[in-house]
Amino acid sequence: VYCSDSNEFVDDVFDSCVDSLPEEHRDKVFYENLPAEEAVSSGQVDEADILIVDPPRKGLSNGVLDLLLDKHSTNFATELKRLVYVSCGFDALERDLRLLLESGLWKIRAAEGYVLFPGSDHLETLVVLDRIGRKWLD
């Protein structure tokens, strides 16, 4: 499992989470403090079957969208079979989903909303998408 985040405060939280795992699983989880686009270009998703994204309110970065739409400069995106998208910004989620669905490469498997902050009008959305097509780059 490869994880990345550009928030500098996540390092300690991640280490605490890894420490809570059974000993035999701790060496299978890795973390780098990187923005999503750098994580993609550094190869974190090269052989991934599943990608979990939790972008800021502005939505997915262009580099991550390019990867998911098979527009990235390399062809490693073809290994992805599932995308789990956690969103706190519905407008960006709608925009990103429209691009993914209109590409013909992805379909929605499931979508649910969660109220994580009772008493507020804030909704977190979880969408699971499955890859249904491929674009091969030359």
Image (cartoon, grey):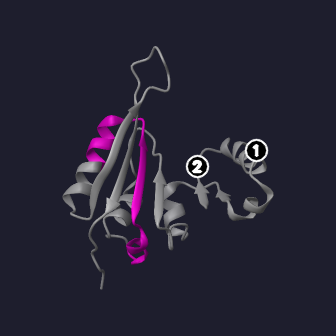
Which quarter of the figure is the C terminus placed in? bottom left
Give the residue at the far bottom of this rendering. Answer: 138
Identified by mark 1, the residue type is Ser
Question: Up-down: is 10 above or below 78?
Answer: above
Whether pointer 1 and pointer 2 mark residues with C-beta atoms closer than 8 Å, the reply is no
- Residue at 41% across, 24% down: 122
Tell whether 126 sits left or right of 117. Answer: left
Which circle, 1 or 2, is nearer the viewer?
A: 1
- Numbered-mark total: 2
Q: Which residue is mark 2?
A: 6
Residue 115 among magenta residues: no
Question: Up-down: is 26 above or below 97?
Answer: below
Give the residue at the far top of this rendering. Answer: 119
Which quarter of the figure is the N terminus placed in? bottom right
102 or 132: nearer the viewer? 132
Residue 93 among magenta residues: yes
Q: Which residues are magenta?
A: 73-96
Tell whether 89 sits left or right of 100. Answer: right
The spot of residue 29 in percent (x, y) is 68, 60
- Residue at 48% across, 18% down: 118
Q: Which residue is mark 1?
A: 16
